[in-house]
C-alpha cells in the first residue's frame, strides 16, 4: 500500500499582515522569511528599494501579498508616505517588527562625532518611535509589536556609546509602550538577542568570532513562536544568547 504524503503544516498566520523594518538583510530578513512560511502577508521596508524588491521576489513563492516600500525611518514624511501605502493596500496591521538599526565604529565618547551620534539615535530610537506611532491607529486587539533591541539594551560595552544609548532608550520606550497598550490587548515584546551572525559586526568588530554566534534564523524562529502564543499570554522580554555566552 503506497504511503500517503504527510499533510502540509498549518499556516498559522494566514491572512494576517506584518510590517518588518530593516527587512532586506540579517534578522529582519530572517523574520520576514519565517512569517512568510506561516503564510503571513508582508510589508517589507528599508532604505534600499532594489534590495527590498529582491526579497519580495524570493518570498513570492509563498503566495502571499507583499508590499515592498522603501522608507527612511529617520524622516517623519517618509514614514507618513509608507503608511499611506500600507493603508491603501492592507487597511490594518496585525504584527509590527521594529527591527531596523545601525551601529557605529568603536569610538570612545571623547572621539564620537555629533553627526554619528545623531544618526544612530535617530535610526534606532526615533525611527522606532515614529513607525510605532504611525502603526498604532491601524492595529487592533490581539496585535503584536516586537522591538529588536539587542542585548545591548541591558548591558554596556565600551566604545559603543551611541549604540548603547539608543538601545537603552528603546528599551525604556518598549516597556512604557507595553503598559500603555495592555488595556487595548496589544502585546509588546522586547527582543534582546545576543551575538548574532549579521553584517552589523562589520561596523564595530570585524574580527568577531562569527562561529560562536547564533544565526538570524534562530532568532526568527523564537520571534514567530512568541507571536503565536494565545492572545491571553505573552513573552515580555526575549533574551536569547549563544551558548558560548556574551562575546
Image: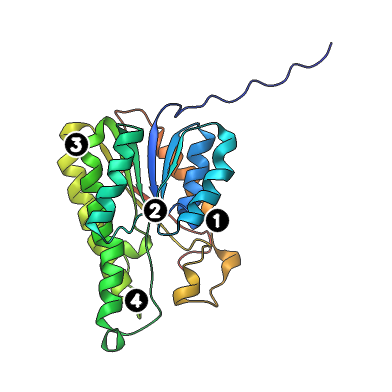
**Which circle's residue, 4 or 2, is located before the other in the chain?**
2
Separation of residues labelled 1 and 4 (CA atoms): 23 Å
- Do labels 1 and 4 touch, CB within 8 Å? no
The residue wearing badge 4 is 160
**Which circle's residue, 4 or 3, is located before the other in the chain?**
4
The residue wearing badge 1 is 215
Q: In the image, which disc is placed on residue 70?
A: 2
Describe residue 46's horizontal placement relative to residue 175 as left or right. right
**Which circle's residue, 1 or 4, is located before the other in the chain?**
4
In the rendered image, the vertical position of residue 169 relative to residue 218, given as above or below: below
Separation of residues labelled 4 and 2 (CA atoms): 28 Å
Q: Quadrant of the N terminus?
A: top right
Local crowd size for mark 4, using a 10 Å CA cut-off: few (<14), some (14–19), many (≥20): many
SS class, disc 1: loop
- Do labels 2 and 3 touch, CB within 8 Å? no
Q: In the image, which disc is placed on residue 75?
A: none
Amino acid at each position: 500500500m503506497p504511503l500517503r504524503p504527510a499533510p502540509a503544516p498549518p499556516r498559522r498566520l494566514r491572512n494576517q499582515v506584518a510590517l518588518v523594518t530593516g527587512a532586506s538583510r540579517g534578522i529582519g530578513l530572517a523574520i520576514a522569511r519565517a512569517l512568510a512560511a506561516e503564510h503571513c502577508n508582508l510589508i517589507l521596508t528599508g532604505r534600499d528599494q532594489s534590495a527590498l524588491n529582491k526579497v519580495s521576489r524570493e518570498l513570492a513563492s509563498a503566495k502571499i501579498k507583499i508590499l515592498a516600500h522603501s522608507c527612511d525611518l529617520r524622516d517623519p514624511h517618509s514614514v507618513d508616505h509608507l503608511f499611506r501605502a500600507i493603508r491603501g493596500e492592507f487597511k490594518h496591521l496585525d504584527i509590527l517588527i521594529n527591527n531596523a538599526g545601525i551601529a557605529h565604529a568603536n569610538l570612545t565618547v571623547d572621539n564620537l562625532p555629533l553627526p554619528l551620534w545623531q544618526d544612530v539615535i535617530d535610526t534606532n530610537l526615533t525611527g522606532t518611535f515614529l513607525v510605532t506611532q504611525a502603526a498604532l491607529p491601524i492595529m487592533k486587539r490581539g496585535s503584536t509589536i516586537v522591538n529588536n533591541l539587542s542585548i545591548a539594551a541591558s548591558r554596556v560595552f565600551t566604545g559603543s556609546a551611541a549604540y548603547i544609548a539608543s538601545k537603552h532608550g528603546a528599551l525604556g520606550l518598549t516597556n512604557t509602550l507595553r503598559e500603555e497598550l495592555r488595556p487595548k490587548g496589544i502585546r509588546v515584546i522586547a527582543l534582546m538577542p545576543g551575538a548574532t551572525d549579521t553584517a552589523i559586526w562589520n561596523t564595530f568588530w570585524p574580527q568577531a568570532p562569527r562561529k560562536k554566534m547564533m544565526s538570524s534564523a534562530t532568532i526568527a524562529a523564537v520571534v514567530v513562536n512568541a507571536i503565536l502564543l494565545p492572545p491571553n499570554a505573552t513573552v515580555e522580554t526575549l533574551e536569547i544568547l549563544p551558548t558560548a555566552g556574551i562575546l
